Amino acid sequence: MAVSATAPILLVLAGPAGSGKTTLCERMVAEAPGFSRVVTSTTRDPRPDEENGVHYHFFSAAEFDQKVADGEFLEWAWVHRKNRYGTLASSVLQPLAEGRSLIINIDVQGVENFRRAAQTDPLLAKHMATVYIDVPIPELRARLAGRGETEAEIERRMITAVKEQEERDRFDHVITSSSKDADFAALQDIRQVVAARVAGA
């Protein structure tokens, strides 16, 4: 069953570092008709190959502060205590209202903020589904080691991963990661289930 333009969906992915969630998002946008990545916001400086409004919405610290104060973000957080990242409500709700399907990967706390927003926003509540990419801890450690992470960084990420796994059962769908192709096939199956639910709602 193809995803209908009249039944846009929002897939919100989360999982530990090394789970492959970014790759899954990129592949969904590349291979699934009608899917776009949510353009998130940041206070960091754009890199030479990045375009404002395409890769990120780039804001100064003062601009970001004002948007936080005005309640324009669905979620936001400090990253490495240096820059802030967040998701503007308009970056999600406007495309959904226009019939475009979206995918985003954020941390577990960000997903909780999306859930809270969905409690008061009917559009978000109807079209959103949360997906946790689960990786067995020994496999996750091996993946991080294979990426060349330092032992200290691996330990830090493992502590975070264990805490994130405690939230796994709160997600609408869980993919137990095995291979890139198997994970993507599982995500495609979830896409079809969610699209059918939204279309039938």
Image (cartoon, rainbow, N blue to C red):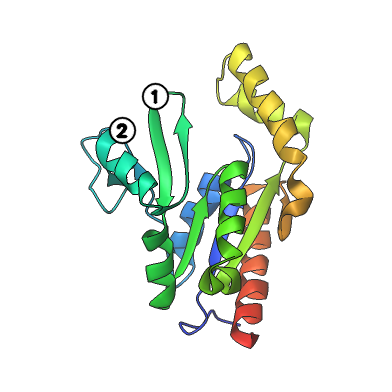
Tag 2 near tag 1, CB within 8 Å: yes
Most distant residue in the front direction: 69
Circle count: 2
* Residue 177 spot, x, y in % from top left: 71, 46
- Split into 4 quadrants, where in the image is the N terminus? bottom right
Residue type (three-letter) at the residue carrying disc 2: Arg
Q: Label 2: which residue?
A: 44
For residue 4, side relative to residue 129 (left or right): left
Q: Looking at the rendering, which quadrant does residue 20 occupy?
A: top right
Viewer-closest of 151 and 87: 87
From the viewer's perspective, is residue 186 above or below residue 57? below
Viewer-closest of 168 and 31: 168
Residue occupying image coordinates x 38% and y 54%: 72
For residue 162, side relative to residue 195 (left or right): right
Asked which secondary structure carries label 2, the reply is: loop
- Of the numbered discs 2 and 1, the one sitting upstream in the chain is 2
Viewer-closest of 171 and 142: 171
Mark 1 surroundings: few (<14), some (14-19) or many (≥20) residues within 10 A: few
Q: Looking at the rendering, which quadrant does residue 127 occupy?
A: bottom right
Residue occupying image coordinates x 75% and y 47%: 168
Q: Label 1: which residue?
A: 82
Residue type (three-letter) at the residue carrying disc 1: Lys
* Residue 171 spot, x, y in % from top left: 71, 55
Asked which secondary structure carries label 1, the reply is: loop
Q: Is residue 145 visible?
A: yes
